[in-house]
Image (spheres, rainbow, N blue to C red):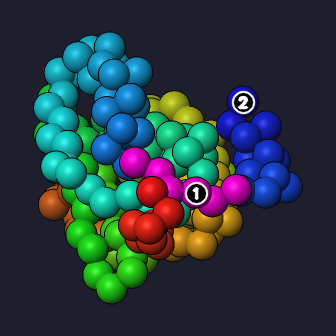
Amino acid sequence: DRLLLLSTVRYDVAYLEPVNMNEVVRDIERQMSGHIEQVNASVDIFGQAPPVLGYEPWLKGVWVNLLSNALKYGGASPAISLGYTTKDKHVRFWVQDEGEGMVPGVAASLFRPIQRVKQHGGIKGHGLGLSIVKRAVEKMGGEVFVESKLGAGSRFGFTLTLADEETD
């Protein structure tokens, strides 16, 4: 399914429109509530974020991937926070976990297809999720980022353009 989504993102056109990220994130939280409860996670979600220009189906995929990774790599009973900041005409969203983090230099390579961190042996996956996230976010005019420090967790996120309030 992820390979199919990757090929779709590669060739499909994103029709950007104002997206209410609050509704998108709440919907994803509801969809993933069983998994969140299963791993005994706490998820703190940001307040009222401003609308951004994006393509809602891809944004849902981005959030599912980032939240799934935080649940997977966030340690036992993960404490996860979803946040955002605004600067100029952009909104920077992120998912922060308190897992073991990564050694310097490893994190940025994770956005390439089939890349996984070796230190997380035993966790299943194909290494495609973050490359799909990167491709989708870039096609919506944004950028991806990761901040991580060994022993201090990771923050994965993306930036998108603030929607012009006149178009809402």
Check residue 130 in the rendering and tell me which mark sits there, or answer none: none
Find numbered disc 2 in the image and state the secondary structure of the residue it sits on: loop
Give the residue displayed 25% in from the left and 62% down from the top: 84
Find numbered disc 1 in the image and state the secondary structure of the residue it sits on: strand
Magenta-highlighted residues: 15-20
Q: Nearer the viewer, residue 6 or 55?
A: 55
Q: Position of residue 77 (x, y in %)?
A: 15, 29
Q: Nearer the viewer, residue 23 or 132?
A: 23
Residue flagged by tag 1: what amino acid is it?
A: Glu
- 29 lies above or below 120: above
Disc 1 target residue? 17
Q: Position of residue 150 (x, y in %)?
A: 23, 64
Quadrant where the C terminus is found in the figure: bottom left
Q: Which of the marked residues, 1 or 2, is nearer the chain's N terminus?
A: 2
Q: Position of residue 142 (x, y in %)?
A: 53, 71
Residue found at the far bottom of this picture: 88
- 7 lies above or below 102: above
Q: Position of residue 20 (x, y in %)?
A: 40, 48
Q: Is residue 154 magenta?
A: no
Check residue 1 in the rendering and tell me which mark sits there, or answer none: 2
Dot 1: few (<14), some (14–19), or many (≥20) neighbours within 10 Å?
Answer: some
